[in-house]
Image (spheres, rainbow, N blue to C red):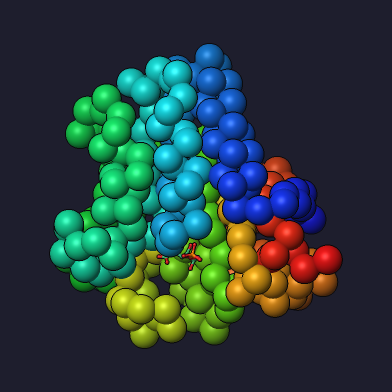
Amino acid sequence: MTPHWNIFADPREVAEAAAEIIGEMARHAIERRGLFSLVLAGGSTPAAAYRLLREQEQDWTRWEFFFGDERCLPPFHPERNSFKARETLLDHLPLESHQVHEIPAELGPEQGAEKYEPLVRNSRPFDLVLLGLGEDGHTASLFPGQEHPAERLVVPVYEAPKPPPERVSLNYGALSSCRGLLFLVTGESKRHALSEWRQGREIPASRVRPPIPPEVLVDEAAWGE
Ligand code: 6PG
């Protein structure tokens, strides 16, 4: 399915658009189903959008947060995706602990994946999945050349080319089980991966195939034209 490419001048505009889309999808989901389940992206790109999102007037009691992947580091390690999400978004919201589902990646890749799988199985389809894009085309912790059994919803990752080497990731099927999918891609370093994707070449990001076209928010530096 061809993604919808949305090009913005710079990372700030990408963040503004992302926060707006997330907020609107949340209001819509809460109105229709009384809940908004959101899978957060890791890495550094989403931080600006998270900081804008936390300023919105929302019924935060209806939000439920999951993670697309996590690095196998101690629970409060600053390089964990959960740490970054708490610092920029979650710790600024009036949430109950049961609303945030961290991946127990401190248990290691296999145990962390096994423990998170039942939650993902029972929470699909997610209302919105947020993802970033790596320079090699990876997304979450699904890397080129690393295959996983399709029937597993959450997978252990070893020897990841992006440190740390051990991670836990939602698999393609779990990331695709959503009502909306939003990629945030900024910076010249992502230009090659984006170009491959635009030309129809398979990269991990293009293997996430929800029932609706993904919305890809990119800045001009990543887009290249
Ligand atoms: C991670 C992320 C990873 C990230 C991309 C882009 O754990 O690092 O899950 O998939 O989204 O590598 O990272 P940046 O946003 O930092 O460029």
Q: Can residue 126 be seen in this view?
A: no
Which image quarter: residue 168? bottom left
Which image quarter: residue 64? top left
Q: Is residue 221 left or right of residue 92?
A: right
- Percent across and percent down for residue 83 are 26, 53
- Percent across and percent down for residue 28 are 58, 21
Looking at the figure, which quarter contains the N terminus? bottom right
Residue at 46% in and 74% down: 148
Which residue ends up furthest to the top in the rendered image? 31
Residue at 33% in and 70% down: 167
Residue at 46% in and 34% down: 53
How many numbered markers are drawn? 0
Which image quarter: residue 57? top left
Q: Relative to the observer, which residue lies in front, 46 or 205?
A: 46
Q: Relative to the observer, which residue lies in front, 40 or 33?
A: 40
Work out whether 99 lies above or below 48: above
Residue at 22% in and 28% down: 96
Q: Relative to the observer, which residue lies in front, 178 or 149?
A: 178
- Percent across and percent down for residue 198 are 79, 66
Q: In this view, does 85 lie to the left or right of 198?
A: left
Work out whether 131 lies above or below 133: above
Q: Can residue 22 be seen in this view?
A: yes
Work out whether 127 lies above or below 13: above
- Percent across and percent down for residue 152 are 42, 63
Work out whether 45 lies above or below 61: below
